[in-house]
Every structure is written in C-alpha cells, then in structure tokens.
Amino acid sequence: MDKRGIDVSSWQGVIDWDAVKSSGVEFAILRSSFGSPSPSQVDNQFYNNVKGAQAAGIPIGAYHYGYAVTEEEARNEAGFFLDTVKGIRFEYPLYYDVEDSATMGSLDRDALTKVIRAFCETVEKAGYYVGIYASLNWLTNKFYPDQLPYDVWVAQYYSEDQYDGHHGMWQYTSGGTVGGIAGKVDMNIAYRDFPKLIKDKGLNGWGSGESGGSGGSEEGSGGERDDRLGIGHCVADVLNVRSGPGTDYPVVYQISTGNMVDVLKISENGWLQINCLHGVGWCAAQYIQWSPFESQQPPIGIGRCTADVLNVRTGSGLDYPAAFQLSQGNMVDVLTASGQWLQINCLLGSGWCASQYIDWFRTNLQVPAIGVGKCTADVLNIRSGPATDLSVLFTISEGNMVDVLEDNGRGWLRIRCLLGTGWCSAQYIDWSRHDK
C-alpha cells in the first residue's frame, strides 16, 4: 500500500512533529548533510528533526546532498554521511541527492554514474539500504540508473509519475502544506513497504531480532542517540584520549584532526567523554568542536563570522570572560539579538559575541513567497543585502530553484532556497509571481 510522506531540511525551520503526525504524514526523509566532511555541512536541524520525528512515531530516512565530481570525493562524502547518521535507526532508505548542476552536472554520463556508484557502494557496505534521488531529467539524460543496483527516488512535479525505470518513491511537488510546518514542503509517495523490507534485512541499524514494527517510536528505536549529547570532530593535530577526565589518567588512544566523535558526557572540570571508532575515553573539551543534538532554544537566524578571530564570551559584554574563539567563515546559529550583542550557538558551544562581526539573517520570519523561479547564471552570488558591496552568504548554480520573497524594484530580489535566504541580482533569476 502506498504511503505519503515529506522530506525536510533546515529550510523548514523548527518543526512541530506531533502536528505533522496528526496531519497524516506517514514518513519523513531528513536532510542530514551536504558536500564534503565539515561540521558546518551538517544540516543544523537534522538531529532535532530525528528526535522530533521519532518521538512523534514517524518513520524516517535521510539524504545527503552531493557535490562530488570524482569517485574519491564521493567516497569522502559517503564517509561524512555515515559519521553524521551514526547510531540512528532508519526505517526508510539513505539517499544520495544527485542534482547540483555546477558540480555533478558538469560530468558526462559515464563519469557521474561512477561517482554515484562510489558513494552508494560505500554506504551500502556499512549496512544501509541505499537509494538515489534525482529528477526525471537527470535520470533520463545525466547518468545511467540502469547500471546502478540501488533504489530510486524520482522528482517530477506533475499530476502523474511518468518515470518508467525501477523506483520506490516519487516526489510529486515542492509546494505541499502540512500542519506543524510553516511554509511549503516537498511531498512524496512511497510505493514499497520500506520499514518491513529494511528491518527484515537487518539494515539501517536494525539488526536481526529487532522489532518489526514500522513506527519510529518503539523502545530503542533511536539506537545510541538518547545516550549522546552531540557529535563533533577533533581540531588538534594529535589528541590524547584518556581513561578519565584529567591529565593524570593514562592515555588509551589518540585521535587526529577531523576525526568524528560522539560526545557522551561533560565532567565538572570541563573534559568530554567521547566515543569513536577506537572506543570510549576522555579528552580536553577545547580540542573538540561539537554541536548538541538539541539546543535549548530554536535559532532566530543563521550567520557567519567576518572577523579573523572573534571572542565568544559567557555574557553580553566585554567584562565577561571569553569561552572560546571563532575564526573567519565559521558558521553559527543566532539564538538571541540584544543590542550590539548576539547569543550564538556553534560547534564549540554557546556564548555571546559582538554583532558587528557576525554577518547574519533571520530564519524565524516565515515570509510567504511572492513567486518561484530558477537561477540562469552559471554561479550566482547570494548576498546579505541588495548591493554588490555587501557580503556573499552563499552561491547558487544554474537551474537551482528558489522562492522569491521580495522584489525591491531596483534590480534585486530577496530569495530563499535550500542553502538559506539572501539577495541577488534579478536579471539572473527567471521567475513568475504566484498571482499571475
């Protein structure tokens, strides 16, 4: 029997998952990450969405948005994906999102097919049921899906599913409305009983003998997740991990820059108990950049540091001590704006910093779109305001779809897409108003 579900990312903001469940949603596919290994590339709502959906009893899957153009890059992305989803049980597949025109779109069909295979093989070998997300056009013209033995999730915004290749899911609109989610959301139909298929095979964290129910709220359905505070990575060249929280305890193993860890506990003297491939141990907190699974309050915005080095303090003033430092380009969630100070949350923790050194925009303003369009430039800068001397927040590529929030009448549009909200030159967006 077909089931209807949604796919979401940080673009949807903070979601009321109980309301989503009450609206009849039967599953959710969550964006976990995008691009190459970096904590800033983890979707900033992923762990909140995992916890909320599972608590509401909604079965989940996940997807990674890809940029890889070589097989090696694809395997690196797959390893990052696996680190991000570690310890979570999924009733639906883990998908590779294949749509980025500036990177993957530059490859010929043979090369892109090899890139997709490298990613999917890596994830499959780790014990997961793997799928590929792509549009009907990409499935038909950009790679060879018949050479890839993986499930397909096809995106085609039409009244009927017209893809005749093997596939288990259809994304039929990006303009759905669901209780508990402000704004539009992607809607999907699953043709297969993925929860039964995955659990019967013992995949996605469901070992033999696990419960065969299809919901996400059975006891233990979150795997290790409830025992962990967050996820992070090592920032030291070599970091000693000890048997206890202090330098007087013996070293049990070492980790290196970029190694991913789960954070289990925080000691009174500021040490972290971590778990990684080498086992459980304790290390100095200053050498682990990490993010809690659930912030105490939802962010009001997102931004990045513009200073070479920025002190983040324990309170909103220069008389408070520095808790840690940010570097130029570090991404942050903005929790509170108070005068000339911002309370921010990032992989190093939470604190206060001078607002002049954070280039940010609000994400909690549920602004309705006045239209929809797509990018016509090879690469288009999305800026913090309607002027070329303002900072670039991110870039989009030819064919990327956007919601148009505002037209200032002077050649600039405020747009919203998967990467966030910002301003761009109107001449590079082919769009139409909803009311026309």
Image (cartoon, helix red, strand yellow):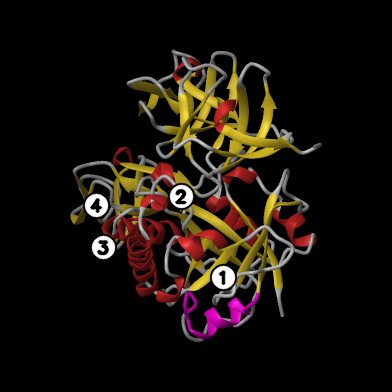
**Residue marked by disc 2:** 100
Q: Residues within 10 Å of mark 2 (few under 14, many from 20)?
A: some
Tags 4 and 1 touching, CB below 8 Å? no
> Would residue 141 be counted in the magenta stretch?
no
Relative to 341, residue 106 above or below: below
Amino acid type, mark 4? Val
**Residue marked by disc 1:** 92
Amino acid type, mark 1? Tyr
Relative to 372, residue 231 above or below: below
Relative to 212, residue 364 above or below: above
Q: Which residues are magenta?
A: 191-206
Of 424 and 50, nearer the camera is: 424
Q: CA distance from mark 2 to mark 1?
A: 23 Å
Tags 3 and 4 touching, CB below 8 Å? yes
Question: Which mark identifies residue 40?
Answer: none
Q: Residues within 10 Å of mark 4 (few under 14, many from 20)?
A: many
Among numbered discs 4 and 2, the one appearing first in the sequence:
2
Among numbered discs 3 and 4, the one appearing first in the sequence:
4
